Image (cartoon, rainbow, N blue to C red):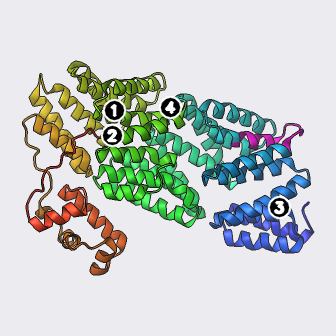
Amino acid sequence: MQGPPAAAALIEDGWRALEQADWDAARSAFAAALADGDPVEARDGLAQTMWFLGDVAEAIALRGQAFDEYARAGRCDDAARVAVWVAHQHAIAGRSSAARGWMARCERVLDGVPVCAGHGWLAVERARLAPLVEEQIAEAARAVDIGRTFRASDVEVLALSVLGAAEVSAGHRHDGMLLLEEAMAAATAGRIRDLHALGSTYCNLIAACAGAGEWERAAEWCEVVEDFSRGRAVAPLFGVCRTVHADVLLAKGRWAQAETALEEALAAHTRSIPEMSAPTIASLAELRVQQGRLPEAEELLSGREEHPSSLRALALLRLADGRPRQAVTLLERGLRAASDNAVVAAGLLAPLVEARLALHDDAGARAAADDLAGLAAGSGIRLLAARADMAAASVAVAGGDDAAARDAAQRALAGFGALLMPLDAGLARLALARALAGEDPETAREEARAALGAFRELGASRAMDAAAAVLRELGAGQGGRPRAVGDLTSRELEVLGLVALGMSNAAIARSLLISERTAGHHVGRVLAKLGVRNRAEAAAFAARGAQRPPETSRTAPVT
């Protein structure tokens, strides 16, 4: 059903403009084709264009109409492709009931139809929605076979990326990475024409790399995807990729750049699909926790207590503000949802060990550490192995087994060092210092001082407190934590004075004729330099005019 000749020509113009990311031209061409002959291809093309322009609701409505027309015309491949797209949009927005409804519509239109490319689209979406990694692998493998059988490159390449990500999540690093890189090579070679399938393929690869600690691979592909996203103004894809890139930067200790990337990602999501911002907000909240800016982390996570992406960040916040029991509850909830996803589970088990230790539940901590070790064994994922060694070291330190703690801490230090993760390597040094305290206190002090130096360079306030506590236990000075007014720049001194007056960031911005965002950055740096947890402590510090605020009792392990 191509419509009259004029409409067909306009549709061709629209698809060409869409592939070139000329959204305005595509919208004009498809709208004109609809007015000229009302063909379904024009409606489908206009729907895709509206999504890229940020009008997601209109895109879903148009594609819903296109589905009905494709189904009536017996075009099952196209009907299935459109239906699973709508289902996926509802799924990422958290509308699971609507997503299931559209999956049912897709299944109905394919019922009784011989296997075709449409069944491949259905299998891809079943894989993405499946709660168990084992189910994801089975459905994605079926989609790959269907795509190859019917020479449906979009189906095949997207399915390869879903399959690769699932294999990595299952702990099969080598096989999963090969599949992901095969998909990426095909995608960048132009084998995918559907921009949505292309974007999903890109995101699957970089998210899987970051989750498994493959920082070099993730950074390499992030550059490719960001160039693609910027050149085509694909805001939703840009936001996702910037978030993953920020996670890479955070792990590698480049926190200032990570903060910028997260802010850019949030801005992109706000303009396009706000529902996709949860992982970005969670990453920014974790950064704020490590910086000791707990009220800001609390504000970021407010109202997001039930979102899966927020559970780890919330748990770390509860650990930091002295509520380990709540942290355990959050982490165990996340573990139940993670099921057989080894990468997600490992990210939750590591802080669970620390939360259990904070509750003096050594047996529970040991059980969590053993579970983490089991996930790491045979997976080939270096990040999981380093986290397992760190957990084992923490448990051994708590149990007084210095020899086991020393060996595990040294393995963790080597692992995190090879991964170029300075915060985690510093925490491993602290565990090693505790293990060496009895037999070699001088080396223990050297390790703790080295850790403190690394934390200071990062601006990791919580970790600095932990290092200072270890040094006090070892009878050594801290080497001076940067808490003096003299460490502040003239602008930061101005900001401190305004904070002491009780001004908000907005009020500070108006007073200093700067943006509110810049004011927030200044406030954050002041809090970090003074080593205080919030604005009230900074104000009290300014009022006293002292060189050092009172020591806090936050000496719990940092995850």
Horizontal arrangement in the rendering, residue 9 relative to residue 486 (left or right): right
Q: Dot 3: what SS?
A: helix
Image spot of residue 484 (x, y percent) = 11, 60
Residue in front for this viewpoint, 178 or 197: 197
The answer to which of marks 3 and 4 sits earlier in the sequence is 3
Q: Is residue 121 magenta?
A: yes
Please state which amino acid type lies under the numbered disc 3.
Glu
Q: Dot 1: what SS?
A: helix
Question: What secondary structure is the magenta-colored segment mainly?
Answer: helix
User: Where 467 falls versus 167 (above or below)?
Assistant: below
Horizontal arrangement in the rendering, residue 365 relative to residue 553 (left or right): right
The span from disc 3 to disc 4 (Cα, nearest Å) is: 42 Å
The span from disc 2 to disc 3 (Cα, nearest Å) is: 55 Å
Given contact means CB atoms under 8 Å apart, are the residues at marks 1 and 2 in contact? yes
Q: Which residue is mark 2?
A: 324
Q: Which residue is mark 3?
A: 41
Residue 252 visible here:
no
Residue in front for this viewpoint, 56 or 381: 56
Which quarter of the rendered picture does the N terminus lie within? Answer: bottom right
The span from disc 1 to disc 3 (Cα, nearest Å) is: 57 Å
User: Where 146 falls versus 378 (above or below)?
Assistant: below
Q: Which residue is mark 1?
A: 356
Q: Which residues are magenta?
A: 110-125
Given contact means CB atoms under 8 Å apart, are the residues at marks 4 and 1 in contact? no
User: Where 56 falls versus 404 (above or below)?
Assistant: below
The answer to which of marks 2 and 3 sits earlier in the sequence is 3
Given contact means CB atoms under 8 Å apart, are the residues at marks 2 and 3 in contact? no
Q: Count neighbours of disc 2 (C-alpha within 10 A) and say few if under 14, some if 14 to 19, many if 20 or more.
A: many
